[in-house]
Amino acid sequence: MVKLYVPKENWIKKLLEYEAIKIVTDENGNEKWKALHSGKVLNKSDIEILSDYNAKVRGLFNYYCIADNAYVIGKFGRAMKYSMMKTFAFKYKTKVSKIKKKYVKNGNFTVNYETKQGLKTSVFYNQGYGKRDSSIAGQVELLPQYKRYDRPNSLARKLKTKTCELCGGYCTELEIHQVKKLKSLKGNCEWEKR
């Protein structure tokens, strides 16, 4: 049985690429992650910052969602969420704890924003990181079955009838004449006239 897995190196590489974390080594040689704020989005509005982080988390999860260990993207999501909170804290020159008090509602990081229709709310990705669509994931090698219907005047339908269009008789050996332009026909043969 073949199983798909999310390589740990890939999502850690993404965190480093997005500059969401920095890996530091302590005196014992153990690696620790330090969350970083994103300087690239500091000048954007709150909803744009949230949308940027959501897009990155959803993008990686959607890429690996059929993997058997898709749940590990949760670690990526938590690191991105903390980086986002550090970005908000840096933007408003405050602490992460104060950002949590202001933006976390019912356990979700929530940003309110104004639209033409009124006040809207957006939350940090909270759809879970479990394996998706297991019915398809277990049968990756199977192709979907499609039924194709021939158009009423298609060549394939005409050939299946095994009937000569010239005389109307049944025959197994049909002769096919391809015509690029109708004006190139001279009308010398009976099939050309038809």
Image: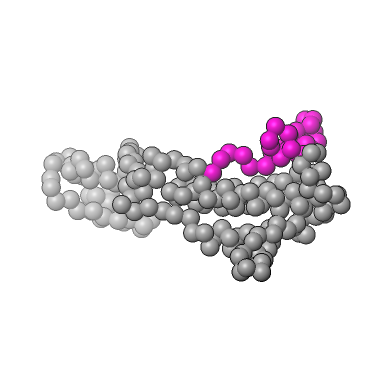
Tell me where the magenta segment starts and ends, as one range: 103-129
Relative to 125, 172 lies left or right:
left
Check if residue 95 falls in the magenta segment: no
Q: For the view shown, which residue lies furthest in the top direction?
A: 118
Q: Quadrant of residue 181?
A: bottom left
Relative to 67, 48 lies left or right:
right
- Can you say whether 178 is above or below 135 in the image? below
Q: Which of the pair 108/30 is nearer the observer?
A: 30
Where residue 183 appears, as percent x and y from the top left, is 38, 55
Residue under the image location 82 percent in, 43 percent down = 98
Q: Is residue 141 visible?
A: yes
Q: For the view shown, which residue lies furthest in the front direction?
A: 28
Q: Which of the pair 95/189 is nearer the observer?
A: 95
Report the number of discs.
0
Where residue 182 appears, as percent x and y from the top left, is 37, 53
Residue under the image location 77 percent in, 53 percent down = 87
Check if residue 123 falls in the magenta segment: yes
Residue under the image location 79 percent in, 31 percent down = 119
Q: Quadrant of residue 123?
A: top right
